[in-house]
């Protein structure tokens, strides 16, 4: 004989109703708050709506298929649940009381005969499941997590280099994620600018930030690709607020023109992700005479971020995320040869030196802009399967392909640094998989204070000299 079991649990949280609704209705994020869930997947594109489907993979080894059958904004969602174990109807009611925002979860489970018998023997088991789920949701919505402190275990593993390399693969991502806290931060009132948003880590970052509700501006050099990415992000997330700015970021006149346009528009920037990147072999120069790795990976984020500082400061709580690379561990900055003119050229060395320079800028900006509420961090995506890796590191790609992370996994820490409340409390650090890592693992890569000062003064001079020759204003704001 089958059996129906009803659960009815309510929590109260100190968060605005619309933020609570936005977090819970994106039901695939249940993996962040239900301890029984291994992973959540949205099977239908767009914002949650009647007909949206989710697959929830349980740690117990089976999957639940949810269909949203009724949805009232900020009020209620009703879902049917199918699985080979049971069927259910789950209703979540949202409301406001004097004590705070309330979330009431009512579930009616229909268990087939064998499970019904087990359920009669252990009647409190389901009750415990319901309670722990709602406690998990309450904790997620309270959003009072500590930012991870530096770990001597990780610093030691980094120093051993080779044994630590597996952490850059998807296995490292999988292991680290077990310790992560939910991110229920609401980005519906934030504006994020993501460079290199037409592929790989950048597109995944822009998509995730749009999924969290942010208005996102994609900075891209190719109009067709930008339009396609904007369309894809809108369709996938249901967020219509995706804009495009065209700019070849390796050309400083274009970077200045972009900064001029953004400053003239005056819109606050809450999140700036300096992600655009590439590896150049053999040595190439831009039309302005700069070595390309230096231009794209170091001078460009310097010019853009310095010039956008007033819009970041306007936010009062802005985040800058610099997408760096573990490659920086191998190189010291050479401020007297920023353009790799001396000795034989190696694209990976030029790349790693530029990323080292970006780490130094991360630390400098973090100090200098602390009073403006601007938090600046750098991160390593790990080894992610992106068009950039496939085309510029083809042998590495062939050998490691099966171990590479997805672009979404590569983007995770950038999104966390941009969004998580606790990530806003730490500035000037280097992160991988939401964990702090040292900025150097070899003493030979440390720059002297004089070298640091020379780097900064050289970049500042180049910012000024490239600004003196404005272009005809290539690139323009497009809503693709
Ligand atoms: N994937 C990894 O394993 C890995 C590891 C460590 C660090 N990273 C870093 O992650 C970032 C993203 O890399 P990815 O692997 O996602 O590479 P990707 O797939 O090649 O994406 C690079 C993005 O940068 C854009 N870009 C390149 N040159 C540009 C220019 N001159 N102006 C404007 N945009 C430009 C590309 O635009 P187009 O589409 O027009 O080419 C693309 O959108 C880079 O900073 C890279 O150094 C990646």
Image (tube, rainbow, N blue to C red):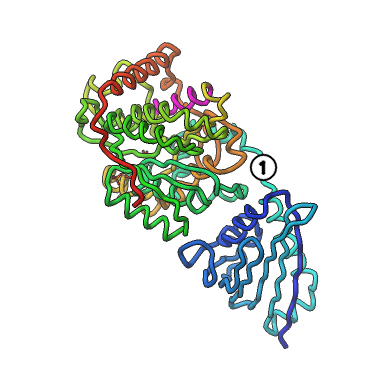
- Image coordinates for residue 269, horizontal then vertical, percent: 48, 37
Q: Residues within 10 Å of mark 1 (few under 14, many from 20)?
A: some
Q: Residue furthest top?
A: 450
- Quarter location, residue 110: bottom right
- Image coordinates for residue 99, horizontal then vertical, percent: 79, 52
Q: Residue at the spot x=39%, y=33% of the render?
A: 264
- Image coordinates for residue 445, horizontal then vertical, percent: 41, 22
In front of the other: 448 or 476:
476
Tell me if residue 189 can be seen.
yes
- Quarter location, residue 121: bottom right
For the N terminus, the image quarter is bottom right
SS of the residue under disc 1: loop
Q: Is residue 449 above or below residue 353?
A: above
Dot 1 corresponds to which residue?
Answer: 145
Tell me if residue 400 can be seen.
no
In front of the other: 146 or 299:
299
- Tell me where the magenta segment starts and ends, as one range: 356-367
- Quarter location, residue 12: bottom right
Ligand 1 resides in the quarter of the picture at top left
Q: Is residue 391 above or below residue 125?
A: above
In front of the other: 473 or 333:
473
Q: How many marks?
A: 1
């Amino acid at each position: 004989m089958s059996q129906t079991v009803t659960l009815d649990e309510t929590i109260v949280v100190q968060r605005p109703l619309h933020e609570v609704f936005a977090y819970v209705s994106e039901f695939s994020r249940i993996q962040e708050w239900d301890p029984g869930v291994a992973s959540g997947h949205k099977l239908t594109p767009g914002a949650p709506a009647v007909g949206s489907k989710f697959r929830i993979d349980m740690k117990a080894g089976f999957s639940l298929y949810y269909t949203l059958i009724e949805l009232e904004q900020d009020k209620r969602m009703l879902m049917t649940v199918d699985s080979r174990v049971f069927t259910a109807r789950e209703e979540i009611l949202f409301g406001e009381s004097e004590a705070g925002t309330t979330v009431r979860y009512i579930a009616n489970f229909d268990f087939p005969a064998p499970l019904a018998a087990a359920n009669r023997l252990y009647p409190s088991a389901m009750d415990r499941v319901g309670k722990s789920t709602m406690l998990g949701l309450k904790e997620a919505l309270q959003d009072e997590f500590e930012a991870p402190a530096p770990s001597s275990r990780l610093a030691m593993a980094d120093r051993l280099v080779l044994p630590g390399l597996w952490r850059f693969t998807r296995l490292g991502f999988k292991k680290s994620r077990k310790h992560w806290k939910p991110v229920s931060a609401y980005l519906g009132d934030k504006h994020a600018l993501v460079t290199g948003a037409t592929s790989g880590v950048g597109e995944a970052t822009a998509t995730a930030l749009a999924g969290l509700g942010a208005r996102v501006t994609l900075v891209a050099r190719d109009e067709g690709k930008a339009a396609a990415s904007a369309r894809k992000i809108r369709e996938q997330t249901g967020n219509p607020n995706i804009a495009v700015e065209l700019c070849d970021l390796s050309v400083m006149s274009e970077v200045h023109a972009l900064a001029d346009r953004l400053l003239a528009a005056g819109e606050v920037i809450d999140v700036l992700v300096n992600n655009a990147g590439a590896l150049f072999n053999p040595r190439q120069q831009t039309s302005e005479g700069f070595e390309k790795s230096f231009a794209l990976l170091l001078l460009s984020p310097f010019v853009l971020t310095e010039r956008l500082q007033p819009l970041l400061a306007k936010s009062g709580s802005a985040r800058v995320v610099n997408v760096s690379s573990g490659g920086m561990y191998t190189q010291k900055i050479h401020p007297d040869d920023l353009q790799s003119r001396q000795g034989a050229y190696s694209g990976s060395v030029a790349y790693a030196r530029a990323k080292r320079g970006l780490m130094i800028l991360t630390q400098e900006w973090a100090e200098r802009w602390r009073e403006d509420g601007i938090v600046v961090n750098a991160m390593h995506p790990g080894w992610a399967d992106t068009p950039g890796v496939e085309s510029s590191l083809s042998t590495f790609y062939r050998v490691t392909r099966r171990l590479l992370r997805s672009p979404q996994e590569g983007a995770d820490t950038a999104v966390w640094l941009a969004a998580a409340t606790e990530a806003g409390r730490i500035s000037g650090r280097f992160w991988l998989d939401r964990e702090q890592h040292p900025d150097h693992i070899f003493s030979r890569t440390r720059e002297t204070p004089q070298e640091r000062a020379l780097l900064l003064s050289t970049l500042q001079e180049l910012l000024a000299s490239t600004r003196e020759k404005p272009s005809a204003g290539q690139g323009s704001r497009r809503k693709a």
